[in-house]
Amino acid sequence: MATLLHIDSSVFPTEASSSRAVTEAFRTHWQEQHPEGTVVYRDLAAQPVPHINAAAHTAGFVDPASHTPEQAAAFAERVRLIEELEQADAVLIGAPMYNFSIPSTLKAWVDNVILIGRTAGETQSAKGTPVTIVASRGGAYGPGTPREGYEYVQNYLTAALADGLGLDVDFIVPELTMAPQNPAMAELIPLYEASRDRAFEEAAAKAKQLAERLAA
């Protein structure tokens, strides 16, 4: 049975969050394809994982037998998150853009699962795992737009997850999500609606394609 690791990081509930709405749609289509499968769900806004501290960081570079009690406790939490990633057949991440980058809660998760000698470096224990990232954003930051140079969500997650961990990263990008709330963006509402519709279509298509890929 296939296992999907689903991670949300938006501070807003589903009805007010584009990333959560699209990850929920993806997950629904995934479960239709995998009725006997398992979903491991982490809501990083509701239950944040610990940010890396000195004990958690240094514990990753020494023999576990020599860990201090503080290092052992911090490292156990990292291992739990790493094992969830390693045991997943696919990963789904909601990554809204906050102030040009990802939420700090999602950064904390990334920092925990990057471990040289296990998930990163020469080994890359989760290498090849498909990851679908819903990178929602209030404006437009795609190639050719005035704010292209301020896009630090896709760029960062590609570097950290694809290059760093060897994961097979794919993106769904609903954008202009602030148009319905910001009067100055009112003329962009049709573009926002088109982007939203496209994101839901991609969620359905990519969930089905992934199911077929894993069944092959």
Image (cartoon, rainbow, N blue to C red):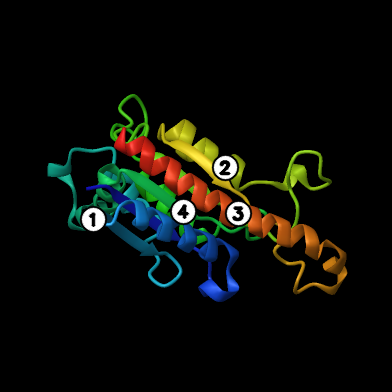
Give the foreground label among 3 and 4. Answer: 3
As measured in the structure, the alpha-carbon distance from the residue carrying label 3 to the one carrying label 4 is 14 Å
Mark sitting on residue 174? none
Observer-side mark, 4 or 1, equals 1
Q: Which residue is mark 1?
A: 36
Report the amino acid beneath label 1: Glu
Report the residue marked by disc 2. Answer: 156
Q: Nearer the viewer, mark 2 or mark 4?
A: 4
Vertical position of residue 120 compared to residue 135: above or below: above
In the depicted view, which residue is nearer to us: 204 or 72?
204
Q: Nearer the viewer, mark 3 or mark 1?
A: 1
Q: CA distance from mark 4 to mark 1?
A: 21 Å
- The residue to which callout 3 is attached is 199
Location of residue 33 in the rendering, given as x and y in whole percent from the top left corner: 35, 51
State which quarter of the image contains the C terminus.
Answer: top left
Q: What type is the residue that disc 4 sits on?
A: Ile
